[in-house]
Amino acid sequence: MLKAVRHMRAVFFAALLVIIPASAFAMMASGDYFVREVIDGDTIVLDNGETVRYVGLDTPEINEPFYLEAKVRNVMLVQGRPVSVLVCAAEPRDKYGRVLAWVTSGGTPVNETLVKEGLARIMTIPPCGLARVREFKALEKEARDKKLGIWSMVAKRAVREITPMEAHMYIGQKVRLRGTVRSIMPWGRTWFLEFRSPNGFKAVIIPKAVDEFDRRGLSILDFKDKEVEITGIVTEREGIPEILIDSPSRID
């Protein structure tokens, strides 16, 4: 019986090795590589077959304003070029198996450049996203102040403006919602911003964003009785429309 169990375990782990590529278990070494393909504004494929996700930022998704501009800029910076890749030792890969790294091309820091030019928001997911957080925040502020890229009026006009009263009509769509926060309610590590609307619309600040508010020295309670703008995708929970806020930059 014991031999049979051991045999079954051996077969199981052998099957895992076949199904899961070896790269999923290994840490890619930092060093110089050649960029074979640009996937989008923040993801590339190297000549060794590894997919690299830039650390500390998030560029627009397809069909969002400035998606194409971010991808084209990334192409200009790295496509078909040798690059230096610095892998985040604290978390070498994300949950999708992509290598998390900072990339430099011809002396130009790619991650920082995309943020500075207004083609990406900062993304402070620990541990890697916090490594250069002060620098990235300063670059994002510079881009916002100059109204570059995603912070420009062009980007704002590309997103439909709605009120809390209309939120239920735009489930699944990205909008910019303007309204006055009537009450604020914490529930565990999640915070709810409530608006006066018959459809019960709420903005939900998720724990990751709450931590970021704290790191920036911002108080969520300051939004009470203030008119705010929230950019995000309207979702629905138990028939009530809501927008998830995953970063302080989603709310102005």
Image (spheres, grey):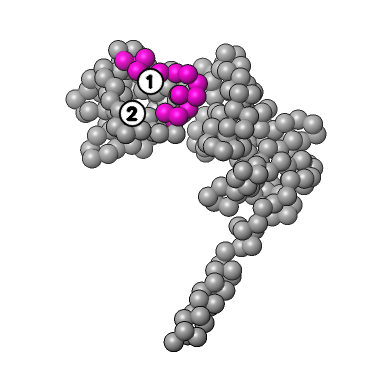
| Extent of the magenta region | 209-224
Front residue of 217/105: it is 217
| Residue occupying the point 27% across, 28% down | 201
* Residue 85 image-quadrant placement: top right
Q: Is residue 62 on the magenta stretch?
A: no
- Tell me residue 206's x, y (percent): 39, 33
Label disc, if present, on residue 193 of the rendered structure: none
- Earlier residue among tags 2 and 1: 2
Q: Position of residue 21 (x, y in %)?
A: 61, 63
Q: How many marks?
A: 2
Q: Is residue 210 magenta?
A: yes
> Residue lying furthest front in this view?
2
* Residues marked 2 and 1 touching at CB (< 8 Å): yes
Q: Which residue is mark 1?
A: 220
Q: What is the quadrant of the C terminus in the image?
A: top left
Choose top left, top right, bottom left or bottom right for residue 227. top left
Give the left or right position of residue 153, taking residue 244 as reference.
right
Q: Position of residue 55 (x, y in %)?
A: 61, 37
Q: Amino acid at mark 1?
A: Ile
Q: Amino acid at mark 2?
A: Trp
Judge whether residue 243 can be spotted in this image: no
Residue behind mark 2: 191
Residue 207 visible in image: yes
Query: In this rendering, would 151 be left or right of 32?
Result: left
Q: Residue furthest left?
A: 198
Q: Main secondary structure of the magenta part?
A: helix
Relative image position of residue 132 (x, y in whole percent): 63, 29
Q: Residue at x 47, y 18 (%)?
A: 217
> Under tag 2, what secondary structure?
strand
